[in-house]
Amino acid sequence: MKELDNKALQEYLKNAIDLETDVETQKRIIAYNDEIASQNEPVYQEYSLPRMPQPPEHSHGMLFIGLAVTIGLFLLMFSSFSNKGYTPSEDWGLYLGFGILILVVSGWMPIVGFIQLLGEKSINDNYQKNVEHYTKKVKEIQQLNKKKKEEYTLQHTNWLTETSEMKKSLVKPYQESQALLEKLYASDVIFPKYRNLPALTSISEYLITGRCDSLTGPHGAYNLYEEEIRQNTVIAQLNVVIRNLEQIKQNQYLLYEQVSQINRVAQGVYSELRQIKNYSASIAASSALTAYYAGRNERHNRISMYCDLLD
């Protein structure tokens, strides 16, 4: 482990905190960008096809049943009267009366059946018209869906290209920050366990406030940090800190400031990206993102020179 005096160690910690903050800020910006990109993804929705007309149901049951019943009753009447010795020529009035009665009782059924039969032509004609209209409508909708599919394919291809380029433009500076942070840590000043924003900010506060003069030893910053974790005085997980930001303001003020800065920058970028219509020009159009990168680049240049001198 490389040892630095108190003043040099504070400078080293400041640079590490700046880079950790940049890395976390850019991770948040990338996540927000992915969220916005998914919300802007084109969606393909086809026009629904009309329902196919159902063929009419032809039922001649009433006609056939009515004829059968009527004929059957007439035959039954003739058979019954013949057995009793009545003849149509002599007892025509009786036959006529019963015949009228049979027609009144059952004759309406074949009449209704005949009416239905005559109405089937009109029903069939309407069905054929409905089929022709349906076929025409299906062809129209299929043409519209084909055109809509082509437009969607073009829009989705453009969306994929734009989101890919946007993602690359955000990932590249993030990787640069990560690489510079690794270069800083490669000097082996800070033990790997404490190479994170909550630990670095707490250790830096101990040195700045004079609670500790060094990293190691029974009264060193590492030992004090571990003790405060055991006592739940400080929170060591960054995701927990983000969810409970106001609770750390007293005991982890420097961490509170850094996380507040991360939230402020990321939220500002998020708000602007959501308002920009031309997604491919989002970076150039976002004043918040441009301002952030300007400050980040300045910090990188400074820390890069610091790393070269540190080696």
Image (spheres, grey):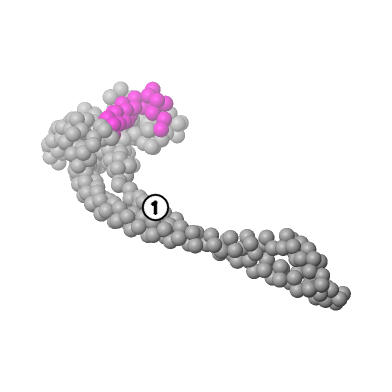
Q: Is residue 270 magenta?
A: yes
**Residue type at mark 1?**
Ser
User: Which quadrant of the structure image shows residue 93?
Assistant: bottom right
Q: Residues within 10 Å of mark 1 (few under 14, many from 20)?
A: few
Report x, y in % for residue 220. Answer: 33, 32
**Residue shown at 67% from the left, 62% from the top:** 109
Seen in the picture, residue 271 relative to 195 is either above or below; the reply is: above
**Residue shown at 36% from the left, 51% from the top:** 47
Q: Which residue is mark 1?
A: 48
**Residue shown at 32% from the left, 55% from the top:** 140
Report x, y in % for residue 301. Answer: 13, 35
Q: Is residue 105 magenta?
A: no
Q: Which residue in the rendered view is the most extreme toward the right?
A: 84
Q: Is 116 on the left-hand or right-hand side of 243?
A: right
Report x, y in % for residue 99. Answer: 75, 66
Find numbered disc 1 in the image and state the secondary structure of the residue it sits on.
loop
Residue 25 appears in the rendering: no
Seen in the picture, residue 36 relative to 72 is either above or below; the reply is: above
Of residues 106 and 7, the one nearer the viewer is 106
Report x, y in % for residue 31. Answer: 31, 41
Q: Which residue in the rendered view is the most extreme toward the front?
A: 90
* Magenta stretch in the rendered image: 243-271
User: Which quadrant of the structure image shows residue 173?
Assistant: top left
**Residue shown at 82% from the left, 70% from the top:** 91
User: Which quadrant of the structure image shows residue 102?
Assistant: bottom right
Q: Which quadrant is home to the C terminus? A: top left
Q: Main secondary structure of the magenta part?
A: helix
